[in-house]
Image (spheres, rainbow, N blue to C red):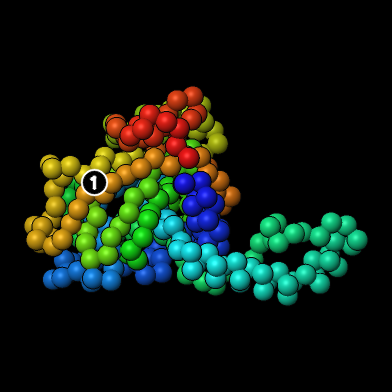
Amino acid sequence: MIRPLLLALLLLSAAHSAAAKGGDGVVSHKSAPTALDPGKAYLLFRSSTAKSGMINIEHVFLRIPTDAEIEAWKAARQASYAADLPKLQKKAKGGPVPTIGEYSFDYAGPGNVFAIDAGDFIEDGEMRQFLVEVPAGDYVLYGISVGGRGVSTCNCLGTVRFAAKAGEMTLLGSLYADKVHKESPIPNLEDNVGPSMFNYGFILGQALVPANDATPVPAALAALPHERAEFRAVGLFHEPGAPSINRLAPIPGILGYDRGKVIDLRTGQPAN
């Protein structure tokens, strides 16, 4: 059930909405490792090199937190709420006091949302190759950051998730991100907003072409354990920290849309 998971992951992402480069346990490799750490997962993908002005447009990932992380967050929130309750009551001046469900606080626990620095690639070219060491778990292709300065655009209107297993590279394929308020030179990106929206600033979009047999793997990594990612559609979700929202471009056989509904093309049913 994806919606409860997304609600859970937002518990932690809200405290780390800055989408800092290099999240907790995240390492971008600039050279090929001789072996993979059996306790870590690895993401291998190609990426376009679009910029907004002089600043790189970068991809944002979000790891779905474990049950233990969610419980730790709840405990920290409860402790913080209890400590702040006298101040909240005083500030309310006899009116409604925010409930714990309405309460926000600065969480010092592990971050689970991160942007990949566009300069931390393992192989250069027209499409750069990235190898990113991450904690094993389930990930969401969350959106786009401009220079790692927060989640500039979230894929709140539809995206995909995938699993990253310990001790192997998960081959994602090719990721594209660019401005889509006008026609993009990248054919993989949708132009479903139009130039009239430019009055309000840049509109960013993101696309994924999943790995297949023809997707190149750097020669130095080819002998290391690897497997293609299995993507699943993710339905609508809320990200309060993103200045703008969009949707991941449709992916044949995986992700589609019908009048605003996110469709899981594997089943033909709306995605949760």
Tally of marks = 1
Vertical relation: 197 (above or below) 60? above
How busy is the neighbourhood of tag 1: few (under 14 within 10 Å), some, or many (20 plus)? many
Residue 198 screen position, x and y as percent: 50, 33
Q: Which residue is drawn at the image coordinates 36% and 32% (left, top)? A: 267
Residue type, label 1 = Gly
Residue 68 screen position, x and y as percent: 49, 68
Residue 114 screen position, x and y as percent: 41, 59
Left or right relative to 35: residue 21? right
Q: Nearer the viewer, residue 76 or 216?
A: 76
Q: Is residue 17 visible?
A: no
In this figure, which residue is indicated by the disc labeled 1? 173
Residue 1 screen position, x and y as percent: 47, 46
User: Considering the numbered disc 1 on the image, is that residue within a helix, a strand or a loop?
Assistant: strand
Q: Which residue is drawn at the image coordinates 37% and 56% (left, top)? A: 138
- The quadrant in which residue 218 appears is bottom left
Q: Nearer the viewer, residue 180 or 16?
A: 16
Vertical relation: 90 (above or below) 194? below
Q: Nearer the viewer, residue 27 or 194?
A: 27
Q: Is residue 169 visible?
A: yes
Q: Which residue is drawn at the image coordinates 37% and 70% (left, top)? A: 25
Vertical relation: 26 (above or below) 156? below
Left or right relative to 109: residue 94? right
Q: Which residue is drawn at the image coordinates 18% and 66% (left, top)? A: 31
Single out the residue that lies furthest toward the top.
259
